[in-house]
Image (tube, rainbow, N blue to C red):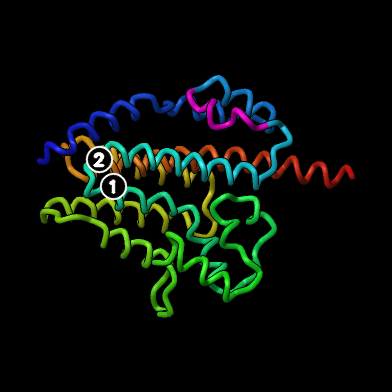
Amino acid sequence: MSIDFAYAQARAQARLGERMAEDGWRVLESSLGLPQYLSSVRSTVLAPRVQHFSIHVTPHTIERTLREDWRVEVAAVGRWVPEPWQAAVGWTAWIPYIEAVTWLLADEPPLPWMPDDPVLSVLALDDPAGRRLAIAGSPFAALDEDDPRSSPERRWLAHWQSLWPATTDEESANLQRLVDAVRDYLAATARDGVTLRDRREVRAVLVDRVTATMHRRIEQPVVVFCYLVLFALELQRLRDGLLRRALFNVEARERAA
């Protein structure tokens, strides 16, 4: 047990105490359209996440805003942890950008929404050579690797592990178990034919595993990453609810045009 993580554990537990209960999520998910969904969210603890959204908000704005919310939260968590762990926590801020950066590294043309993103705008250059130089000078340099056997996710993970300071065998094992739990979740939700009900059930399993780890592994590094997993699941669930309804709005406007 490391006394250095006592403060981080206390902050994480306090934040988790503010999370919305499952009953509240069920009310949100019964909303029939984006206006009703936004109205319902604004009566919950998630209200700050949608404060700037109108009923005409675009999917790209939703995605960009929630990516920013994630970065802000990671920065806050980085201030909770001992200095040797701050780089490893900070590296998690870039998880939502892995797919986009991988696209750019494949010399694909920048997508229309990328220039509007404050992180990607400096990387989404038309010239592939200039783009690679920009990526090489950015936090995403660790994702640029020629080995085709190494997936972007594996590169992200390898760099994250390289940022750990000295850890005990127990600390490393607990962090690896968290990685395995997240991998199980991602694999299950990526299967063909996964329904919303399936996603709820798989998510609930991961929440139970992560919450149990937080309660058992007192004042260990894994606690802050468990918190970030739970926060990410909350953002993902909100994102899914917003996007489904925003995309329906777009389709309805196109049909009416």
Q: Callout 2, which amino acid?
A: Val
Q: Tell me if label 2 and label 1 are in contact, CB under 8 Å.
A: yes
What residue type is disc 1 on?
Gln
Give residue 152's position: percent from left, percent from top. 43, 67
The residue shown at (42%, 66%) is 141
- The secondary element bearing badge 2 is classed as loop
Residue denoted by label 2: 81
- Left or right: 138, with 119 as reference point: left
Quadrant in which residue 146 is drawn: bottom left
* Left or right, residue 41 beside residue 5: right
Number of residues whose C-alpha sits closer than 10 Å to that of mark 1, classed few (under 14), some (14–19) or many (20 or more): some
Residue at x 69% of width, y 28% of height: 35
Identify the residue under disc 1: 86
**Tag 1's secondary structure?**
helix
Q: Which mark is residue 142?
A: none
Which quadrant would residue 145 be assigned to in this image? bottom left
Quarter of the image for the C terminus: give it: top right
Relative image position of residue 254 (x, y in whole percent) = 83, 47
Q: Whole-percent x and y of residue 130?
A: 58, 72
Range drawn in magenta: 45-53
Q: Residue at x 11, y 56 (%)?
A: 169
Q: Point out the image quarter for the N terminus.
A: top left
The foreground one among 57 and 237 is 57
Q: Kindly tell me whether residue 204 is visible in this rendering.
A: no
For the view shown, which residue lies furthest in the right direction?
A: 257
Question: How many numbered marks, from 0 up?
Answer: 2
Vertical position of residue 164 compared to residue 4: above or below: below
Q: Closest to the observer: 68 or 244? A: 68
* N-terminal-most mark, 2 or 1: 2
Magenta residue check for 71: no
Kindly indicate the quadrant of the structure image that contains residue 50. top right
Residue depicted at 57% across the width and 50% down the height: 118
